[in-house]
Amino acid sequence: MKIKLLIASPDIDYVEHLSNVLSEKHSDTFDISVCSSTEHLSNMLNSNKFDVALIEPIFVSTINADSVRLLLMLMDESSNTEDYSGAKRIRKYQRISSIAGNVLENYAEVSTGVNSFDSSKARITAVWSPSGGSGKTTVALAFAANSVLSGKSVVYLNLECFSSTSVYFKNSGRSISKAFEKLESNVHLFLAGIRQQDSSSGISYFCEPENYDDMNILSKEDIETIVGACATGVDELIVDLSSQCDERVQKIFEIANTVLLVCESSGTSQIKLKQFLSQHNVFGQINSKVVLVNNKGAKTTDASISKVIHLPLLQSNDPVSTYKTLSGGNFDW
């Protein structure tokens, strides 16, 4: 079920442009109605109910609480500073993607228990390694970019204790830490509202946490909620994990469809991988969904793993160009 969004402004050109872009870019999210006169607005409210009304102040007296669940005021620099009964404000002239995000964030606050997207769930791929420095994040992003190239909608979720997201993407949006405060609300709507999309790769992502503790205090139940919310309404969710194997990582192993187990050729990586395969009971539980990724030219094999991907060693100091180059490789298993 889509969010029923009403846009009301006397600026006809603005309304048409805003509604056209939202319809084109967010057709799976919003069911949009527009009006530009008080009479038209009254008629619409008498015969319809809306989840969100995004209106200019001139129309505020026409709105009634029975017809609109959430009222958002569309404000520009010339708007006066009246309180408008505590209604949230959204800046009129900004990127339309930001307006859409603001609407979703605010609606998430009042729509607990309401599923405003379809019920489709992404295929979840967890990317993990028992050793640091194996190129796990590069593999995760290469696979994400490869999936975008195949026509899928892809979300990359970095759950490392110390995130490296800003190395690869702009970090100018709302921090994912904001979502951690909203786990009791409609969190998948909130996450959809703060999600960014990288223009060059097409990968959707979240800006990194504000500090280490924001990620570290999450319980395994919190992690499951976040992963489930991120996986709603898209084709692929790639989850980048820290190298420990705690209960939160194990929970993601449990709910993932595939686990990409990354190793490289160094002695440290090989020894830690061998220990995980032979000594850790978690491997036995996830063996059927594991794909071994030999990164940086590694040649590791193990009789217990039937699915293997080989990625070459690239001589580059640019992490972005590295993952984009690797995205053109073979990720079939």
Image (spheres, rainbow, N blue to C red):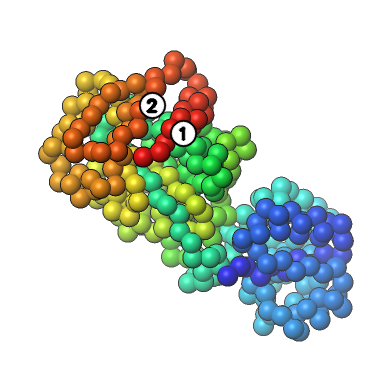
Label of residue 319 in the image: none
Position above or below: 4 against 254? below
Q: On the image, numbered disc 2 is attached to which residue?
A: 311
Q: Are marks 1 and 2 in contact (CB under 8 Å)?
A: yes
User: Could you tell me which quadrant the N terminus lies in?
Assistant: bottom right
Mark 1 Cα-neighbour bin, 10 Å: few <14, some 14–19, many ≥20: many
Q: Residue 10 placed where, x, y %?
A: 87, 64
The residue under label 1 is which amino acid type?
Answer: Ala
Residue at image position (24%, 43%) is: 245
User: What residue is at 46 percent from the left and 33 percent from the top?
Assistant: 142
Q: Is residue 218 left or right of residue 190?
A: left
Give me the C-alpha separation between circle 1 and circle 2: 10 Å
Between 315 and 331, the one nearer to me in the picture: 331
Residue 226, given in percent of the width and then of the height, sits at 41, 55
**Is label 2 in a helix, a strand or a loop?**
loop
- Which of the labelled discs sits on residue 142, or is there none? 1
Label 1 vs 2, first from the N-terminus: 1
Quarter holding the C terminus is: top left
- Using the rendered image of the protein, determine whether residue 251 is visible from the camera's viewpoint: no
Looking at the image, which is closer to me, 202 or 80?
202
